[in-house]
Amino acid sequence: MAALVNKIVLLSFLLVTIFVTSQIMDGVESFSLIRRAVVGIENKLPNLNLTFHCKDKYRDNGIHTLAPGEYYQFGFAVAPSFINRTQWFCLFSWEGESHNFDIYVEVRDNCGYCPWVIQKSGPCKYYSTHVDCYQWKTTGQLERQGRKMLLISNTSIQQEPPLLHQPLNSQGRD
């Protein structure tokens, strides 16, 4: 009986070790129970640098600046699908303007790779067949969602529909 218990303990230890190792391997495709998402941000502001600060309720991705045409991406673990609470929000600014937008909301985006283009009129998310463009969040929307302007926390899952839903032409995003 003791031998059987020892084998079960050893097997359990090996399975836990394999699971933990697969979770900490960054950038390596492996079996994982924890989904990951990558958000890409491209600056399409004409002749303007884009500075942005993205965070979620628990993590802060820091402040980044992109020259026109430059691209930045960051990845994170997505909460289990029955929770649907993973949400990243960003403050975007350039020459005298600043705007807020929820760059990743699981119930809206639910993507492994989420490319966004930032324009003066608002952010646009590209899919393989179409593009969805959104308006910037207003101060009133931020206050209704219980946020401070510093974007400390956000757990709202209500999302505005896209302002523009347009099929992509064969040329892609230009």
Image (cartoon, rainbow, N blue to C red):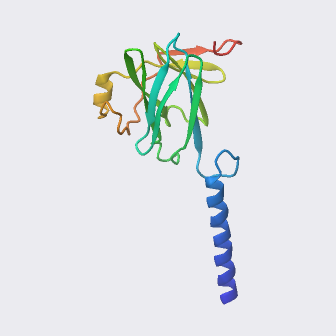
Residue visible at 48% across and 20% down? Answer: 50
Q: Nearer the viewer, residue 144 or 123?
A: 123
Q: Nearer the viewer, residue 42 or 84?
A: 42
- In the rendered image, which quarter is residue 40 located in? top right
Residue for point 47% across, 41% down: 86
The quadrant of the picture occupied by the C terminus is: top right
Q: Is residue 1 visible?
A: no
Residue 95 in the image: x percent, y percent? 41, 14
Q: Is residue 34 above or below residue 65?
A: below
When the figure is inspected, residue 133 is found, relative to residue 29, above or below; the finding is above
Quarter where residue 8 is shown: bottom right
Q: Estimate the x, y position of residue 151 in percent, counting from the top left.
A: 36, 34
Foreground: 124 or 129? 124
Q: Is residue 134 left or right of residue 96?
A: right
Q: Position of residue 170 (x, y in %)?
A: 71, 13
Residue at 40% over, 42% down: 57
* Res. 171 in view: yes
Q: How many marks?
A: 0
Residue 84, position as x, y percentages in the image: 47, 42
Residue 32 shown left or right of residue 145 in the figure: right
Residue visible at 66% across and 44% down? 27
Q: Residue furthest bottom?
A: 1
Quarter of the image for the N terminus: give it: bottom right
